Image (cartoon, rainbow, N blue to C red):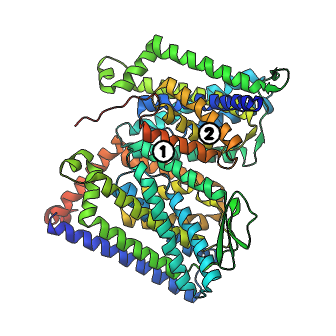
Amino acid sequence: MTQFLSYLCNGISLGSVYAIIALGYTMVYGIAKMLNFAHGDVIMIGAYIAFCAMQYWGFPPVISVLAAMVVCTVLGMVIERTAYKPLRQASSLAVLITAIGMSYLLQNVALLVWGANPKSFPSVVSLGSLSLLGGQMTISGEAIVTIAACVVIMIALTLFTGKTKMGKAMRVVSEDKGAAELMGINVNLTITVTFAIGSALAAIAGVLLCSAYPTLQPTTGAMPGIKAFTAAVFGGIGSIPGAMLGGILLGVIEILGKAYVSTELGDAFVFAVLIVVLLVKPAGLLGKTVHEKV
Amino acid sequence: MSMSMRKKRAIGGLVTYLMVIAAYLVCQYLLATGGMTRSLRGQLVPICVWVVMAVSLNLVVGVSGELSLGHAGFMSVGAFSGIVASGWMLGAFQLENEVVRLLLSMIVGGVFAGIAGVLIGIPVLRLRGDYLAIVTLAFGEIIRNVINCLYISIDQGRLHFAFNDSNIPGELLVSGPKGGVGIDTIATFGMGFTLILFTLFVVQNLVNSRSGRAIMATRDSRIAAESVGINITKYKMMAFVTSAVLAGMAGALYGLNFSTVAASKFKFDTSILVLVFVVLGGIGSIRGSIIAATLLTILPEVLRAFSDYRMLVYAVVLIVVMLATNSPFLSVRLQRVKALLRRRNTNPGKEGEAA
């Protein structure tokens, strides 16, 4: 039983990282209707920046995380302006392939700058682990911080999209771009801000991911990126609570699948669940079904 | 369709055949005279494989208009079933004739990939757009994961299968994460060339047939096609499965070209690589796919010295091509240039001479 609980706890912790990444995916998809394949690689860049700040420049962890967030925010905005903005009217296939190209670009730039050898990422969390049930079960400090960060981000984003002017503008743009423009909303600015927020979240996710799984290399972001995207689709893409739910469920399924079914088949398990969910509910768990008009 | 358009298409198809045959003859000439470096000679079969992969993916992405990100999955099904079939035929029937064995292995690879295509196509083709893309990606990853745990051995002409357990009698043909081991490398350039011709024959005939026009109609407007009575699922399935079969045959050829092939060779990146061939060659253009696949397979060999920058260049080229062909700013200008050229072509007497 305690074994199960500790697996569950690991699952929720990993799932929280997926959820933070998935939030970035889902916000961008909701507003720009595009799959930002490069999102996973922004995570990796964020982790590298935090790594450099801590190891080479000697900054404390908090400042390092902030530095990573700033760099990723700028990076996200630059990517959006240069690669995606010119393709606003293009087919979704063209945008998707551009995003894949961007993902390769980031990976290979990282490969040239930091090399292919994996770096051992120092944990940013100095919190000790928590003992429960008379020492039978321990929860690592990283897991606690990850779950807490995820909850805080979730609440902050909900308030942001519900209460602030920019947040409301985002919701309007995702609903109807043309009408939003007529109401005097700066659509391009809104989309850029969405990318900025998503990328800042990616930086946080990168640091938390590498604190828990401390090998950092140029391909670190790729698989979590794909899984987080899966999580976003799983929960219903475009929906913020959906991304959260999807991320956490996916993390739990992955860890439990690896523990009880087969270590090698953990990833296959995750994808199989995604397929089943999409077949039963093609719009995801919390997604809205949109009817096609002729 | 008007007669002249049909004629144009037929001539276009013929040009593609002639191009491939000419390239084959040049290669044979270079091989005979020794004008080909060792590393380039090693690339001949892979080039054929990637050409077939690109053309078959183009059938799904270009002709049927559905983005598939799991094409490497079909290639890997074909590769491993081909490897096992070849080992089995050698072990059980002492089939020494390499050409026959290769041909049969490729057919087996195609059949298994086709079955996988049907199984995957039924659920996948119910979805649309980005969802379809992500589910094909998911299937590609599942196939890779499963093959990673698969052990197949042959003992006195009998095949043994095991999952996650290498303790099976006889000689291992497929060994989990190591993939195919001790493969009898029977793939030949000639067979690769034959496979390209076969692929061209299948794809061009399909595209120019009644079914092909139905497939393209569902791509251009799903609703309009449905309203004139076209069975969308049937035609989408036709394109998807044909593409899977061809990818499986290419996979078998690829698998039998190396002494070891790991399942990790067929990961997501490989699907993307093939997609890059298709996109750079021009979505929907078969000839473009062939040229792009050939050039981009040779290019890394030629640019060995710059191998660190290879993928970087790939990425930049991919983004630039997509921006150049899709951004409204550039496409308006391209249209103007095209219009200008067309005017010259239609009035060669007046402007052509003046120019």
SS label for mark 2: helix
* Residue B58 in the image: above or below residue B93: above
Give the amino acid type for the residue marked by disc 1 in the picture: Ile
* Residue B308 in the image: above or below residue A160: below
* Residue B323 in the image: above or below residue B256: above
Give the amino acid type for the residue marked by disc 2 in the picture: Pro
Query: Camera-side residue: A70 or A231?
Result: A231
The chain ID associated with circle 2 is A
Q: In which quarter of the image is residue A209?
A: top right
The chain ID associated with circle 1 is B
Tag of residue B111: none
Left or right of B318 in this view: B262: right
Q: Which residue is drawn at 48% across and 69% down?
A: B110
Residue B124 position within the rendered picture, expressed as x and y whole percent measured from the top left: 42, 49
Q: Which residue is drawn at 42% across and 58% down?
A: B118
Q: How far apart are marks 1 and 2 (CA)?
A: 14 Å
Question: Quadrant location of the N terminus of chain B?
Answer: bottom left
The residue that label 1 is drawn on is B134
Question: Around disc 1, counting alpha carbons within 10 Å, would you say few (fewer than 14), some (14 to 19), or many (20 or more)?
Answer: many
SS label for mark 1: helix
Residue A84 position within the rendered picture, expressed as x and y whole percent measured from the top left: 45, 37
The residue that label 2 is drawn on is A224
Residue B253 position within the rendered picture, expressed as x and y whole percent measured from the top left: 54, 73
Q: Quadrant of residue A267?
A: top right
